[in-house]
Image (cartoon, helix red, strand yellow):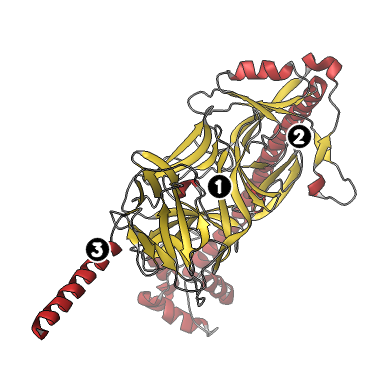
């Protein structure tokens, strides 16, 4: 009897262990089951895991999703961000009556729910390979975590707006690494009627960073976005939605975009060499920060420092103490009674201005865009909305100010700014004068160099002639010595020593004769300054000794 009970107990424990193990690696959950603290769901490819976790040394429990195979805890989504459970009694279940997910604890108090009101027949919760947690009824999605991102932007997720429902997809940073409750940093699209959508980072309600408008290839203020073997970028702008997303070309790489409160930045990360590496950051520098040089100012990075300048035809608004937050104003106001005589100047390599007060048409040509802007005196500038091929589409900027312009060393765009015709004529005349002055100055420099060379050449020839005469005199002295004529020996010795033919310390010419007559002791000169070979010199100076 005891043996029977023992076998039964062992069998029951085995079944329980099997069920627990199987449940721990399930990818979906039906309404008849619940997810308790200590158990998890894993995506089919085992990339992501859903369960309860704590942060740092805290005992607070959160329900969330994290990377399953990465050894560093990397949480990408949290359900109860600001309502942690104080104990390990958390439980996630499906409420089939309301077609929603509910997170309970203790005496079944609701900590978090999806607030869905759709009744479901056979709802199932599933963790997808993308990291998206979905609640669906058959083929209908009742709710999904990708519609409610936290601080992490995963491949396949969207940032933008559903224009039919008014739902926004945006990121909100954690307060800090141990508190997933939203901080004051937000990353998402700002959309206005007929304006070109742009992505902003907001600090509270203040604009901190602007991506620029989408130009068919990239956002105008994000020049590093380009074709690459790792990512595909997707931009949607139609009557149903405005959104930006990306997908991975290779599944061998884990990558994500994270909004960080601690650094006040958006970072693109990739898991390489067993660590998260930062591959891009926004804002990247001071010029990348929103409107650093004020209205009608242009920001350029020089030696890692921001340099502010007014656009051509504009001057600082504050003339006393330069405060770039006040920006710049026109040198001459536009006269709208003579608007048809206005002209447009082209500025290249720019991050296009903020599009809050803009109008966009994706089918117009650049010529049509210019004509439409010219007919409206309040239109300050225009540009193509799409730079692919030869360019297409039209963006018009209205008002008296252009905000958040910066110079880009690569992948910048062209902007056409409105000016009075007289100012352009004056500017071109000044430009012509500057070119003439530059040409005259260049010719003057070249002429001066030629004159300097001629003077140098003349002096060089004179010096060479004097040197030649001196050397010929020395040769004559040597020949006189060869003939036995009386000469001043010390003068020859001194000259030969200067020419490096002799190396000795004595002034006694007899000793010199001995040294010279030994041809092997003669040191070769650094430079031959008179036409005598070594053997001729030896013969000339040693003749008397041989006799």
Q: Residue at x 45, y 45 (%)?
A: 143
Q: Nearer the viewer, mark 1 or mark 2?
A: 1
Q: Nearer the viewer, residue 189 or 91?
A: 91
Q: CA distance from mark 1 to mark 2?
A: 37 Å
Above or below, comparing residue 281 to residue 223 in the picture: below
- Labels 3 and 2: the sequence-earlier one: 3
Q: Residue at x 52, y 30 (%)?
A: 240
Number of the label disc, if any, that sits on residue 22: 3
Question: Is the residue marked by circle 2 packed among few (<14), some (14-19), or many (20+) residues within 10 Å?
Answer: some
Number of the label disc, if any, that sits on residue 395: none
Rendering quarter of residue 45: bottom left
Q: Which residue is the site of mark 2?
A: 312
Q: Which residue is the site of mark 1?
A: 170
Kind of element beneath mark 2: loop
| Quadrant where the image shows the C terminus | bottom left
Q: Nearer the viewer, residue 496 or 86?
A: 86
Percent from the top left, x then y, of residue 251?
Answer: 32, 50
Q: Can residue 402 be seen from the camera position used here? A: yes
> Is 125 positioned to the left or the right of 105 in the image?
left
- Labels 1 and 2: the sequence-earlier one: 1
Kind of element beneath mark 1: loop
């Amino acid at each position: 009897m005891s043996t029977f009970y023992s076998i039964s107990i062992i069998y029951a424990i085995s079944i329980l262990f099997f069920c627990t193990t199987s449940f721990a690696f399930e990818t979906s959950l039906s309404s008849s089951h619940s997810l308790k603290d200590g158990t998890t769901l894993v995506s089919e490819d085992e990339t992501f895991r859903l369960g309860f976790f704590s942060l740092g040394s805290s005992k607070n429990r959160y329900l969330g999703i994290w990377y399953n195979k990465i050894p560093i805890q990397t949480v990408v989504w949290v359900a109860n961000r600001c309502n942690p459970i104080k104990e390990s009694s958390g439980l996630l279940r499906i409420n089939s009556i309301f077609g929603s997910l509910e997170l309970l604890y203790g005496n079944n108090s609701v900590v978090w729910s999806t607030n869905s009101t759709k009744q479901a027949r056979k709802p199932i919760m599933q963790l997808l390979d993308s990291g998206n947690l979905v609640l669906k009824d058959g083929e209908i999605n009742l709710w999904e975590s990708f519609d409610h991102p936290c601080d992490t932007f995963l491949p396949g997720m969207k940032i933008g707006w559903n224009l039919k429902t008014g739902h926004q997809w945006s990121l909100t940073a954690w307060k800090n690494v141990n508190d997933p409750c939203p901080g004051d940093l937000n990353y998402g699209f700002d959309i206005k009627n007929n304006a070109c959508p742009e992505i902003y980072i907001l600090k509270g309600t203040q604009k901190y960073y602007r991506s620029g408008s989408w130009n068919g290839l990239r956002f105008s203020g994000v020049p590093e976005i380009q074709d690459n073997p790792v990512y595909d970028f997707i931009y949607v702008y139609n009557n149903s939605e405005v959104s930006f997303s990306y997908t991975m070309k290779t599944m061998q790489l884990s990558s994500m975009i994270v909004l960080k409160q601690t650094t006040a930045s958006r970072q693109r990360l990739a898991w390489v060499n067993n660590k998260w590496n930062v591959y891009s950051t926004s804002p990247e520098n001071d010029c990348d920060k929103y409107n650093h040089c004020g209205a009608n100012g242009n920001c350029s990075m020089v030696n890692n420092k921001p340099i502010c300048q007014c656009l051509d035809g504009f001057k600082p608004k504050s003339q006393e103490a330069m405060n770039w937050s006040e920006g710049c104003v026109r040198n001459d106001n536009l006269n709208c009674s003579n608007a048809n005589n206005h002209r447009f100047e082209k500025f290249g390599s720019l991050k296009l201005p903020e599009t809050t007060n803009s109008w966009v048409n994706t089918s117009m040509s650049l010529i049509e865009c210019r004509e439409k802007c010219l007919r409206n005196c309040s239109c300050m500038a225009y540009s193509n909305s799409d730079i692919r091929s030869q360019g297409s589409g039209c963006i018009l900027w209205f008002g008296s100010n252009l905000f958040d312009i910066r110079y880009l060393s690569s992948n910048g765009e062209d902007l056409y700014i409105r000016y009075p015709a007289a100012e352009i004529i004056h500017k071109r005349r000044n430009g012509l004068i500057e070119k003439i002055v530059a040409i005259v100055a260049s010719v003057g420099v070249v002429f001066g160099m030629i004159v300097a060379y001629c003077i140098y050449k003349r002096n060089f020839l004179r010096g060479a002639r004097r040197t030649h005469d001196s050397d010929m005199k020395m040769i004559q002295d040597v020949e006189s010595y060869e003939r036995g004529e009386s000469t001043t020996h010390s003068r020859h010795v001194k000259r030969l020593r200067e020419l490096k033919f002799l190396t000795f310390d004595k002034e006694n010419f007899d000793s010199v004769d001995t040294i010279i007559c030994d041809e092997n002791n003669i040191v070769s000169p650094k430079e031959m300054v008179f036409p005598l070979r070594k053997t001729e010199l030896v013969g000339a100076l040693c003749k008397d000794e041989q006799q």
